[in-house]
Amino acid sequence: MHSVILLPGLASDTTLWRDQLPALAARHLVHVSDVHFRFDTLPEMAAALLAECPGRLVLVGTSMGGMLALEAQRQAPQRVAGMALLGSSARADTPELLQLRSDACRLFEQGRMDEVLRANAFLAFHPNSTRRDGLVDTYLAFVRRAGAAALIRQNRAVMARIDSRPLLPQVACPTLVLCGEADRLAPPEHSQEIAAAIPGARLEMVPGAGHLLTLEQPARVNALLLGWLDGLRPAAPATAPR
């Protein structure tokens, strides 16, 4: 039986999966990885993930976690039984985005983390989500827990990633691609090109969600993940005739 490994996004922890964990764990073996906090590059994170989690894996990653899933699949395709990529991208950063991340890292180093986080919160959520009690505070709390050093290290890991698009046609495992309809950090066209390039991939847009779709639309995300995961289960062996 394969294990389901949940891969949080940049500066995110188990909180990002708080609404998925109970639903998924009731039917699957589930583990939330923290390799993004312990290693400096995506290749190092992926290698550690593969070393620490034995057997066949289903990788479910959001944002940076999706990038990590693609890297793990590149390193050991025979180990990956399936991938779900949520609000992610296979592209390398553009020069403009590299500059934005570099500028943000300088602000983190200057102790101006909250200034960046509050501005980013309104990009991370669907406009309706920012008006929901506690949701922005939940986001700010788990990023603050990560701290400035982790934010800088993980941004640099993302900045150094390769363009994975040429590798997508070689992906042979079942793949589910989810994207919030109002995602401004990894816009829908990023998910659309992933799904179009991976043979047999399934694309689902999530209404009423931005980049943090696991928090914004948990019921819809849970239904999509559970339906897809259940389809990955090997068929039960036929009963031998008597």
Image (cartoon, rainbow, N blue to C red):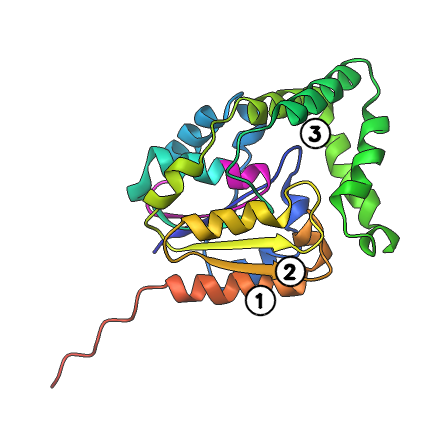
In this rendered view, identify the residue nearer to me: 233 or 26.
233
Magenta stretch contains residue 30: no
Query: Where does the image place residue 147, in percent across and percent down from the top left?
Result: 73, 25
Foreground label between 2 and 1: 2
**In this rendering, position of residue 214 left or right of residue 173:** right
Measured in 3D between alpha carbons, the distance from the residue under mark 3 to the one under mark 1, in whole angstroms, is 29 Å
Q: Which residues are magenta?
A: 53-67
Determine whether 237 is above or below 36 in the image.
Answer: below
Kind of residue at badge 1:
Ala
**In this rendering, position of residue 186 left or right of residue 1:** right
Determine whether 207 is above or below 177 in the image.
Answer: below
Q: Residues within 10 Å of mark 2 (few under 14, many from 20)?
A: some
Query: Where does the image place residue 202, in percent across and percent down from the top left?
Result: 47, 59
Kind of residue at badge 3:
Ala
- Image quadrant holding the C terminus, namely bottom left
Magenta stretch contains residue 66: yes
The answer to which of marks 3 and 2 sits earlier in the sequence is 3
Element assignment for label 2: strand
Q: Residue at x 30, y 69 (%)?
A: 235
What residue would you read off at disc 3? 146
Label placed on residue 180: none
Q: Quadrant of residue 216?
A: bottom right
Q: Quadrant of residue 63?
A: top right
Determine whether 148 is above or below 31 in the image.
Answer: above
Residue 42 is at least partly visible in this image: yes
What residue would you read off at disc 1? 223
**In this rendering, position of residue 150 left or right of residue 72:** right
What residue would you read off at disc 2? 206
Query: Where does the image place residue 233, in percent across and percent down from the top left?
Result: 36, 63
Element assignment for label 1: helix
Element assignment for label 3: helix
Residue 86 is at least partly visible in this image: no
